[in-house]
Amino acid sequence: MTYPGFKAWPSWRYGPNGEAEIFEKAEDVPKGWQDHPSKFKRREKGEVEKEDDGDADLGGLTREQIIGDLQRRNVSFKETETDRALYRKLLKAIEAQS
């Protein structure tokens, strides 16, 4: 059921490691993300869920380089986020600053 004036997009979507982002359309949502955080099983603190495509393109950067750049740009992140999620945050921060 839809409500008068309801718009489905843009919409918040939630990643497996506690990430939360707003996406403009369904095609932009990464595989494995859900429309509500409760759809993920609870994990122990510090446990990271692995994304199924381990060879994610990170622009030639290491996790440590991405984290360092996020810190220099004062972008908040969680240590449990996947490499690809961190890289997406970095790209958004670069885009926002240009």
Image (cartoon, grey):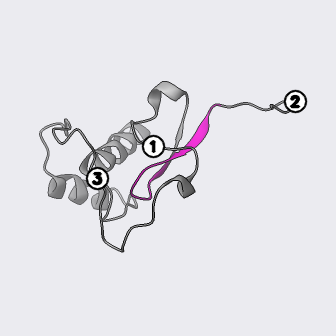
Quadrant of the frame with the C terminus: top left
Mark nearer the N terminus (2 vs 1)? 2
Residue highlighted by disc 3: 82
Residue at 19% x, 40% y is: 58
Residue drawn at 12 percent across, 39 percent down: 60
- The three-letter amino acid code for the residue at tag 3 is Thr
Quadrant of the image for the N terminus?
Answer: top right
Name the front one of labels 2 and 1.
1
17 falls in the magenta region: yes
Q: Check the image and name the residue furthest to the bottom.
A: 45
Q: What is the distance, in whole Å, between disc 2 and disc 1 at their CAs?
A: 27 Å
Residue that protrudes farthest toward the front in the picture: 41
- Residue 79: which quarter of the image? bottom left
Pointer 2: what residue?
4
Which residue is located at x 80 percent, y 31 percent?
Answer: 2
State the SS at label 1: loop
Which residue is tagged 1?
A: 33
First in sequence: mark 3 or mark 1?
Answer: 1
Point out the stretch of residues depicted in magenta. 9-20
Q: Earlier in the sequence, mark 3 or mark 2?
A: 2
- Three-letter amino acid code of the residue under disc 1: Trp
> What percent of the width, then of the height, locates residue 92?
39, 41
Dot 3, crowdedness within 10 Å: few (<14), some or many (≥20)? many
Q: Quadrant of residue 19?
A: bottom left
The correct choice, above or below, for 81 with respect to 5 in the image is below
User: What amino acid is found at the position of numbered circle 2 in the picture?
Assistant: Pro
